[in-house]
Amino acid sequence: MDSSIIKKIIKGAALGAVAAASVFVFVSSSGGEIKADLHSADKENVRAAAVTVTTATSSAAASAAVTSAATSGSRSAAASVTSASGTVKTTAKTTAKTTAKKTAKTTSKTTKATAAKTTKKTTAKTTKKTTAASEEYIETEQELYNEDLYNEPQTEANYEYYEEEQPVTEAVTTAAPAVTTQPPVREQSETVDTQGGRTVINYAEMKGMWVSVFELQRLMWAGSEQGFRSGFEELCRNSRSLGINTLIVHARAMGDAMYESGLFAWSDFASGTVGRSPGYDPFRVITDVAHSYGLSVHAWINPYRCGSPKEMAEMPNGYLIKQWFNDPDKYPEYVQYSEFYGKYWLNPGIWSVRSLIVKGVQELVHNYDIDGVHIDDYFYPVPDNSFDEKTYKNYVDVGGNMPLADWRLSNCTATVKAIYDAVKAENSALMFGIAPQGNYENNYDYMYADVAKWIAETGFCDYMAPQIYFGYNNSRKPFLSTMQQWLSLPRDSSVSMMIGISPASIELNDEFYGDVGITAREVSDSFACGADGVILYRYDSLFAPSQGYAGRAANEAAALTRVLTE
């Protein structure tokens, strides 16, 4: 089937939504795979769309692909990890070995936590949404996440050029019953900053939860700081009861901010209007409340993604991104529009763009009592040459000789390295984590994210959390073999591997919906195979699901609680 038809089938099913929900569906096409983040309560249309374009491949074939990736002609781990330092470790662990590990874990958690203090471990993030809302709210979420339809080049990109040089109605949800029992005391590996006595909370074994702008928007519609505080306290209680020890909280989703920033405009998720303050600083509340529950907080940012044309037009003047947007002749390709996503995108190949991103990280780690910084899989939006054609030509004109793909990889690596250095310069105890696509090959073929290099060498990240949002029976990327593929990659002893798991998939995927406890088993299997932690996408999927899913979400939460608190 023609890939453009595939995209229309999926998008059409999603746009017919009456309530918001999401899941990643990988389907085959002439151009490879397309990652679709669907939002729809019209499950039959969505499922039919997925079935229409899916071709079956066996789990054995997927496992074979894991082994052959290192020797394939396409970009793979092998090319990147051969330069790893002598401290590289391979974490393909046997079930027997990890069974012993899990037994030991229950008898020596304190020892493990103390040991982890001197190395590093902690957090991560994973992706995509689910929450019921009015049609207006649904359209907001649909618009934001349609960008996940990426595995093929755009054919009709209508790009514009842009730069700088710095000087809803209330969501209607049916909440799943919260677990009321007090959570057991978890091991807590605290490190104290000697520079000013700052306490940094991070865990040897991360059990994380992504808290997106959609959760924050729902809580902030209470309209007051006290209302938000009360809602976030409930979120922390529920997370703790589930067994969570780390929150990955959206701080910057689309070139804007969910906190008081001198570099980025207030997000419309905070107040309903781009650039307008909600009247208080939600991130101060977030860190204060989360820490009172012993929860680590990692600020989650999307470095390159910006808003829709409407949001960009509404952004107040005075911000670098808006300067770049307003004067594309002076700042060509600084901010590019992607018709594929319906969003603007910062160009990773421009130094001033990377500088702004890093300054934003410095602002966060210096001004807020966070415990880490987290980025996800939004790197390059598309593989099209037209996205950064002028920028690449400038590079070649001054003597650059890297092929386009290698040059793009190096640009993303430069950003990752600069963020890591900025985090550690503020406080070496702070963590920096990356949550790339769970489809390993996509990171190289479409996103230009050199994930193998970032974990095989020191100085790029403290942890990685691939978003493995697949079921055990996924025809292209079965959970077990995909997870094992990531765990088998060579990585430096300083880098932890978390696994991103998606309770959000319950609302749109037959396997997830019909198999109560599937995400709990994925958590158990991740630890059994040697993962250092897990991160769940996302909070509302379990505690404020779409209408009609409260019972199913409550059952999944109960299964997860048993596994995460054992």
Image (cartoon, rainbow, N blue to C red):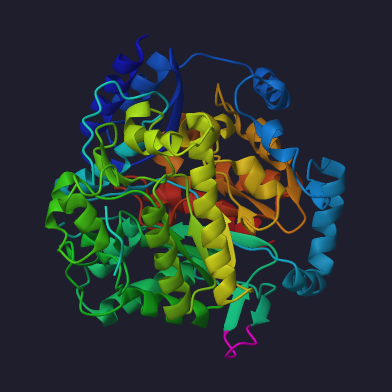
Q: What x and y, as percent, mark residue 273? A: 15, 62
> Which SS type dominates the magenta stretch?
loop
Name the side, left or right, on which 489 lies relative to 314.
right
Residue 51 located within the stretch drawn in magenta: no
Nearest the viewer among 96 and 390 is 390
Nearest the viewer among 187 and 425 is 425
Count the labels in the image.
0
What range of the chain is rendered magenta? 193-198
Vertical order, 146 against 321 (above or below): above
**Residue at horizontal 60%, vertical 22%?**
74
Vertical order, 316 against 183 (above or below): above
Position of the N terminus by quadrant? top left
Q: What x and y, as percent, mark residue 245? A: 58, 67
Name the side, left or right, on which 542 lies relative to 171.
right
* Residue 524 in view, yes or no: no
**Residue at horizontal 67%, vertical 31%?**
481
**Residue at horizontal 27%, vertical 27%?**
11
Residue 197 located within the stretch drawn in magenta: yes
Q: Quadrant of residue 234?
A: bottom left
* Residue 15 in view, yes or no: yes
Vertical order, 182 against 410 (above or below): below
Name the side, left or right, on which 331 lies relative to 177.
left
Q: What x and y, as percent, mark residue 479? A: 61, 34
**Residue at horizontal 68%, vertical 63%?**
121
Nearest the viewer among 116 and 304 is 304
